[in-house]
Image (spheres, coloured by chain):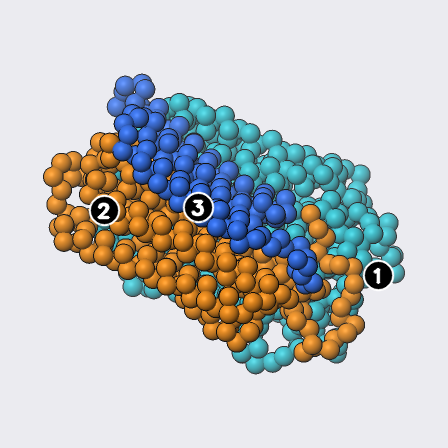
Amino acid sequence: MSTGHAGVDTRGDSSAGARAYAHQFDSAEHQHGTAQLGMWVFIAQEILFFGGLFLAYTVYRFMYPEAFAQASRHLDIVLGGFNTVVLIGSSLTMAIAVHGAQLGKRWMQVIFLLLTIFLGCVFLGVKAIEYGHKFHEHLVPGPNFRFDGDAGHAQIFFSLYFVMTGLHALHMVIGIAILGVLVWQAARGAYGRAYYSPVELTGLYWHFVDIIWIFLFPLLYLIGRH
Amino acid sequence: MSVEAHSSDHIAPIKLYLAVFAALMALTATTIWVAFIDLGELNALAAVAIAVVKATLVILFFMHVKYSSKLTWLVVASGFLFLTILLALTMADVVSRGWLGTPGG
Amino acid sequence: MTSTNYINADYGIWSWLLTKDHKRIAILYLVSITLMFILGGFFALLIRLELLTPAGDLLAADTYNKMFTMHGIVMVFFFLIPSIPAVLGNFLVPMMIGARDLAFPRLNLASWYIYMAGAAFTLYAIFTGGVDTGWTFYTPYSTAAANTKVIPAALGIFITGFSSILTGLNFIVTIHRMRAPGLTWFRLPLFIWAHYATSIIFILGTPVIAITILLVAVERGFNFGIFDPKLGGDPVLFQHLFWFYSHPAVYIMVLPSMGVVSELITCFSRKTVFGYGFVAVSSMAIAVLGFLVWGHHLFVSGQSVYASMIFSVLSFLVAIPSAVKVFNWTATLYRGSIEFAAPLIYALGFIGLFTIGGLTGVFLATLGFDVHVHDTYFVVAHFHYIMVGGAMMGYLGGLHYWWPKISGRMYPEWPARIGAAIIFIGFNLTFFPQFLAGYLGMPRRYHMYPPEFQVLNVMSTAGATVLGIGYLLPLTYLLWSLRYGKAAPANPWRATGLEWQTPSPPPTDNFATTPFVTEEAYDYSSVPEAELV
């Protein structure tokens, strides 16, 4: 573990504007590594945030395996599978955008950030279509819920389905908004070899959201298919 | 490739990203394929195992953890460790609740 | 006092509301949580007045339910949890490690605004009818039966949770990345170790309560069935999720307090802490073990007895690092040249009260005994010994100790000593009778009780009055000292630690030059005698 300061007192040269890092840091390198650690700690808390939902899922699937299998068969495996491909694809474009930033290639960043936004929007669009189907089929929990079979337990499944995918989608909306700012900044040439922390950290966030979906897809769509 | 400012960051080649993406696609296909085979109890295990492998690929390569400091490993690991604690100790209750056969036991 | 410091560096309301200086943000928190403490104290006053007589004559049952609920919510989520970390931690973590600020100053300011937003929701719930679910929000009552303002109160707690998470994130990153050269991990003040351990709980525990309380709001608001027993939902699952955070939350309250006490004991006995490494590591052990014990809140909730046995054994383990601390503090005091300054009186009070609270915790972790006293005043007394006797004593002790640094003024010593003594006496008079009442079978959360418990309840209410007066004292003389107190020197206690090597109050950047640390913590031989006041 590194000791924070490099041992050099930078306050001597208080040529304020020239400094490319905030006053509490010793160097741009120091600031960059600190920001990275901050994002990782944030992701650690995200794991536990979604973890509560995964616990609820595990408990109820253990209690009501049949109802969960029945309910899961009402999800559209084609749309879910398509969205999985789209989202993993967006992780690839995001990784390439970061790569572009690291090498200081401005247009590579912009193009791949835009691609990432596009794929994210496709995912959300497909998700919206799926939600629409569920409304028509009366599979949204609440007084209008209709289900042939174990309706009570199936309703728990759909409650979890909507909360888990809903929070996942909310994370994507936030991610897309941040990506939008990044595109604008990147086009202005704000990021290059010397400074690309925002692109990299947004990438970490985006990949994490992808990982959540990597678990949600088999757990929600692929039960009781055989 | 030399980069002046962030010498600590590893820059992975695009080829690697493409390879990881291909692996993730293959694993997605596998998980769908496996779901349609009747393995009994093992279906759930297979689904989770494949998802763990996919997540690990994303973490190691897309998120550069393979090239990151021990501290990053520690932060990621503690997130998953405490999630495991939450799952394991709660399931210890849920699984054994019926064992005594008494109401509320 | 004419030199520029963080207080007089800038003027006007916006210089405070838009500040990124960790010291100013600490002051924002200090004011906010003090107001919340007064509100929570008001609810406590009404509870104690109602319980003066066995009949339910002051408050109707419904109103009483709201009073203990709002007392709990305000005190736990809006006072105790932010108390030491957000005020003293915010002020001192960067100073103690020789940094110019926290790693993310803007995030730090954001977390105060998030706290205020959460407080706004909760205050809205309180002033538009209140909540009556108990601070624990147990389902299905909270989701299906209660007809009070559950959703705004729940959202308030959800939002405030993120304030804690961001504070914890800032501390972890700052302690890893911002230490002055030479300040290795095992040279860190124990206050820092305690805050690092607390931050781990913030990061890994708080998100779970956030999602849980959000599920309650969703179930109530959208008729989603998640914990609803009518659909086959499991209310015990809610309790697992709730206590996975809320048990470690007790350590969020008491660990920072332990960090403060470590600083106070060593300074006022003028000896290095006995077994520094053990005290440091025991903070980490408490943080981690604290995550393995939550099931002891579910012994009578229909949790499997096998799980209960596991949780019971794991709960006993937390006693070990806690005892390590108490023994090491005692050994530190042994043959020290002790000065009974007000902060030390608080610290000694902490040790005594925490020991009682901790040991009764071991009782409660014992399956058979817990079944006997579950949901009685024994439990109420136990957790108040930890949360008020422990956390609150540490907070006040720390506030006095660092008051010269924070305000640049000395507090008046004798009123402070008397205040500390009154608080200690008042606290014990309030809560010790509750152990007895609970052991004899008086259940918690009722507004009336059988007449045979009246003597104990009158004692308790009398004690609460003394305690209330005790709390008014510091509030009064600390405000007084802002104008009339003696100007504080840089190091009034001849303490070690980097925060004392800079003027009181410190300049905005904390240090004129980044300190270079060459020695272990608490080496009193290096403190020059000349600084004696």
Dot 1 amino acid type: Glu
Judging by colour alone, the chain drawn in cyan in this rendered image is C
Q: Which mark is residue C167?
A: none
- Give the letter of the orange chain: A
Marks 1/3 in contact by CB < 8 Å: the verdict is no
Q: Which mark is residue A76?
A: 2
Q: Helix, strand, or loop for circle 3?
A: helix
The nearer-to-camera label among 2 and 1 is 2
Circles 2 and 1 on the same chain: no
Image coordinates of residue C82 in percent, x first then y, are 52, 56
Provide the letter of the chain coloured blue: B
Type of amino acid at the residue the image marks with label 2: Asp
The amino acid on which the numbered mark 3 sits, given as a three-letter code, is: Ala
C316 in relation to A71, above or below? above
Residue position for label 3: B22
Q: Which residue is label 1 attached to?
A: C531
Q: Residue at x 33, y 44 (%)?
A: A217
**Same chain letter for marks 1 and 3:** no
Question: Height in image: A126 above or below B30?
Answer: below
Left or right, C401 with reference to C43? right
Q: Is residue C350 visible?
A: no
Q: Is residue C35 above or below residue C237?
A: below
- Give x and y (percent) for residue C31: 53, 66
For disc 1, the neighbor class at 10 Å (few under 14, some 14 to 19, many from 20) is few
**Rendered location of residue C300, percent (x, y):** 35, 30
Residue A192 seen from this side: yes
| Residue closest to the eye, C451 or C418 | C418
**Tags 2 and 1 touching, CB below 8 Å:** no
Instruction: Give the left or right position of residue A147, taking residue B101 as reference.
Output: left
Q: Residue at x 25, y 47 (%)?
A: A78
Q: Secondary structure at mark 2?
A: loop
Q: As rendered, which of C507 and A156 lies closer to the eye? A: A156
